[in-house]
Each structure stands twice: as structure tokens, then as C-alpha cells.
Amino acid sequence: MSSNVEKTSGAVDKLKWLIVFALIAAGVIGNSFYADQSLLNRVLGLVALGAVAAFVAAQTVKGQSFLVLLKEARLEIRKVVWPTRPELTQTTLIVVAFVLFVALLLWLIDSLISWLVSGFIG
């Protein structure tokens, strides 16, 4: 068993999260308040606020664990054996053929049921 000890978030972390939510709220309210300004300026302001909010969030315990998760996910992605182009093409063609076959089969069953119901109803 793994004996990972989780750090508990204290009052400082709660203050940091409060700052993050205040920055996000300021972005939302500021975007609507400055609706008459250029879209480029508003987008740049939102990106800047988002970057600051992400930086502050990354300084918290949860933010640090999220960054560790991202690093571990990146390592796992490097371990994936990606298919070659011929394998990808062959698999795609098999899937397309199977989908067309099932579509044709469902169309035939639907036509048969429709023909039976219309013959039974009159």
C-alpha cells in the first residue's frame, strides 16, 4: 500500500482560492461592464486575469497536486504505442464498412417491419 500523506489546506489556501474566484468574477463583471470597448482589449484582459488566476491557483495544495497529475499524465502519454498509418487506415476502413453494413441491415429491418405493419393495418 502507498503511504502518501495528503497536505491539508489551511487558511492561506482558502485565501488563495478566494483570490482566484475574485479574479474570475472581476473578469466576468469587467467583460460586461466594458462591453463598449474593443473585443481584442477585453479578450486580452480576460487572458491576463485568467493567467493570474491560474498562477495563484497553482500555488495552493490542490493546484500543486493538479500540476503533478498533469506531469504524470504527460509521462503516460509518452508510453503509448501509437498505430502506424497503414494500421490506422485499415482499422478506419473496417469501422466504416461495419457501420455501413449495420445501417443497411437496420434499414432492411425497418422496411420489413413497415411493410408488415402497413399490410396488417390495410
Image (spheres, rainbow, N blue to C red):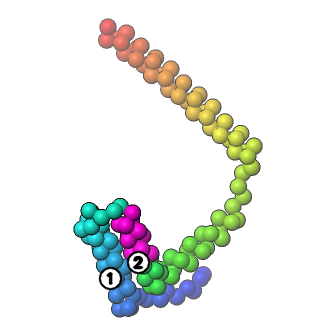
Could you tell me which residue is drawn at 26 percent across and 70 percent down?
Answer: 29
Residue nearer the viewer, 91 or 71: 71
Dividing the picture into quadrants, the one containing residue 95 is: top right
Identify the residue under disc 1: 18
Looking at numbered disc 1 in the image, what kind of residue is underneath it?
Leu
Tell me the quarter of the image containing the C terminus.
Answer: top left
- At numbered mark 1, what does the secondary structure look like: helix, strand or loop? helix
Q: Which residues are magenta?
A: 40-51
Closer to viewer: mark 2 or mark 1: 2
Dividing the picture into quadrants, the one containing residue 46 is: bottom left
Describe residue 87's horizontal placement relative to residue 47 as left or right.
right
Could you tell me which residue is drawn at 65 percent across and 40 percent down?
Answer: 92
The image position of residue 56, as x and y in percent, is 43, 82
Whether 51 is drawn above or below 6: the answer is above
Looking at numbered disc 2 in the image, what kind of residue is underneath it?
Ala
The image position of residue 54, as x and y in percent, is 44, 76
Identify the residue under disc 2: 53
Could you tell me which residue is drawn at 42 percent across and 79 percent down?
Answer: 52
The image position of residue 50, as x and y in percent, is 41, 73
Q: Residue furthest bottom?
A: 11
Residue nearer the viewer, 44 or 116: 44
